[in-house]
Amino acid sequence: MNSQLIPAPDMLGLPAHPLLLLVLLNATLALHWVFVGAVFGGTLIVLHNAVTGRGDAARARLNQAILGFLPFMLSMGVTLGVAPLLFVQVVYGHFFYSANVMMALWWLLIIPLVIGTTYLFYVAKVRLAAGKVLGPFLPAILAGILLVLAMILSGNMTLFQTPSAWESVWRLHGAGFYHGGGMVGRVLFALLGFAALGAMFVMLLGKTGLAYDEQADRAAVEIGLRAAPMCMGLQIAAGILLVIFLPSEQRKAVFDFRWVSLFSVLAIGCLAGSLLLFVKARRSPTLSTLILPMAVYVLGLIMIGFARDGIRRAALAPHFQLGELAIHPQWGPFALFLAMMVVAAGLVTALLHLARQTD
Amino acid sequence: MEYPIFDLPFFGGSLLIAAIAIPHVFIAQFSVGASFLLALAERRANREGDSETRAFLKTYAFTVLLVPYVLGAMTGVGIWFATSVASPRAISSMIHLFVWGWAAEWTMFIVDIVAIYLYVYTWDRIRPSAHNAIGWILAVSSTVTLVLINGILSFMLTPGSWEPLAPYGFWKAFFNPSFWPTTLMRFFVSLALAGAVALLLMALMRTVPAAVREKMTRLAYRMMLPALACLVLLPWAFSVIPERSQQFIQGGAIAMTLFFAMGMACFSLLALGTILAMVRREWNPSVLGASLLIFFAFVGYACFEFVREGARKPYVIEGFMYSTGVTTEKGQALDKRASLAVLREKGVLSAASWVLPLGRTIAELTPEEKGYAVFKAACLACHQVYAGYNAVQPLIGGWTRETLRSYLDTMHEQRPMMPPFPGTDAEKDALAAYMATLTRRGK
């Protein structure tokens, strides 16, 4: 490709060492995934209940409980997504913005889709709260929109690490959609993980007694325990296939026995470990036996983030090396960020404490 | 420049950003004020054991705080999406300069989201004092987000003593000359917006008891009064913006002057309406009256946002980057590809490969194609071609090729809103030739 098509990195350089920025990128990205995963997986379970649980009062109440949380989970997912969006722009901005412009119409479509999804969740929630039956139509629409969102985001992220495809996508001047470079596999891998996260979220609702009554709580744990390991198993299989079908230079990075290999192995290890722990927890699913596999899974998400980033750097290697970027540290503002993070953590803890103060 | 250019027909990138940003700013600032209104009113209702006022506040919290807040949060992310498409070089520099400021703001967003949902969904379920404490946390955290984002936004017009990569650059940029007056103005306006919306809600909810109506109306008026301080803050802000921008507002750019006057008129009517209603002890607002106040607030606010954006021209970051994405002398030492000095020497097309037809080189272009490519690289960020936002064809009707060519040499002197032409003489020739074809097509 014409190397002139790749913009220069931003002239102001990095405000911190790239390693710090990548740690923050992947840690916040994992948090973002947890919440959007809960939304996607939760919606699938609502759809499943609406299709297979007609006339089952416990499942209807469980749906009500899940939908009660989904608008909040989506708001949190979107908000938590702001931080990785920030850090990805700092490190890879010149590639990222190019992909945004090339897929501009799709990229901008995300905004009305997310707004629409939020309000559709409210519609579904209000319907159930009013005692009406929630058929499969609305949850199916919601799941469909979330699928489209995942495809746009994955398409964009794949495009930005594939400069060789830029010219062909740009032929449509902003209306192009990229689905090459392993994008379909990435979407499948992500969605299976999101489905697993949704199952964990529903399990948590049941185990913390937030699903209205005992029957609904039991249904929540049952469905969650059935779905989570199954989705994880499929996700591991999809992950292996994804690596096999990656473009060759990226696949080599996974098997280079360096950092990417390590993170890939750790990621698969965490996913497999979490799966086994869930299978074991089926015998006596208490809150403590369920929290451990969930924590292991979240750790796996962070590892996936790092492995994914390594693969991205391998893909970009002919055009860009992190070491080329100038670093101009801003320690004072970084301290401000850390201080605000501590204050925010304290405030969220205080808020949760206040919310438990009943008469 | 450097990036592919997304040409949104008719609207252009600027209007796309404005279409998302203005409703976002309005909603976001309303939310700040509304959280204060709720926290204040609830504290008083708790003290007086006033369950009727609490019932009204519960409705207010759900219908006019939570629902729009979610829209505000989503459109906030939307602004980033839109700017990354419409103005990638500018947003890139803003992100690289302010990433920790934005990250700090993000931490408060999380507090906001948790607080707002807890506030709405724990009404009457937890101790009233604990509930009110949640309200105060929301009010404080949302104010902090307002302060942080305003430091970043106000920098774009008044960077003050900031120099790229100079020591303490972040702090100099953040606490720029217009930081304090604009932060205070935004805060007071946010209180006024919340007051106006409370009036409308009361006007719509005819079943609200008279006592509650009076209490809330009084509070709403009191929330609106501090906006009068803007009459002092506005001249302060005006005094620190660049002289060029002051001239735009004082008649140098007719649209800017008109929008500024309209903004002032709207806010004056808002203030006048509030004072009159207080003097006449109107505790029973009408739907029309309350709607008018909100209308004045929205239009006034949109006008000032338009002026704020427009007053920056020809820069997107004052003195550092033109709205075309070309950097000025200030960034010359850092920007090896798209600073004005480099482009004047190597040509604008040297840094704008995406504007060439795919697979073709500059040498292979016809003169008209070359002119159009220069137009896309140097003009399309602010001008549509035939119709729509700042369309160029109606602006140059009747101009000859020679007039156009000579105008390109001095356009930044003749029109202070225009940046200097960022290219070589040959590119000026090509652009003039292309634009001359537009004037012929227009006849």
Image (spheres, coloured by chain):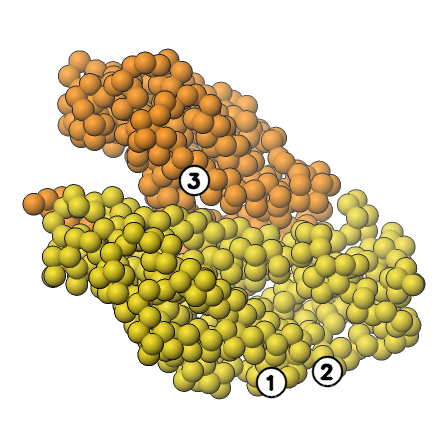
In the picture shown, does residue A111 fall above or below A152? below
Residue in the image at 79% along x and 59% along y: B386
Percent position of residue B210, x then y: 25, 60
Q: Which chain is yellow?
A: B
Separation of residues labelled 3 and 1 (CA atoms) = 44 Å
Say left or right for B287 vs B256.
Answer: left
Number of the label disc, if any, that sits on residue A119: 3
Residue in the image at 53% along x and 32% along y: A148
**Which element carries disc 1, helix, strand or loop?**
helix
Which residue is disc 1 drawn over?
A: B250
Q: Chain of mark 2?
A: B
In the picture shown, does residue B324 fall above or below B61? below
Q: Amino acid at mark 1?
A: Gln
- Quarter of the rendering containing residue A294: top left
Observer-nearest residue: A238 or B184?
Answer: B184
Q: Chain of mark 1?
A: B
Which residue is disc 2 drawn over?
A: B413
* Location of the N terminus of chain A (image quadrant): top right
Separation of residues labelled 1 and 2 (CA atoms) = 18 Å
Q: Amino acid at mark 3?
A: Tyr
Separation of residues labelled 2 and 3 (CA atoms) = 50 Å
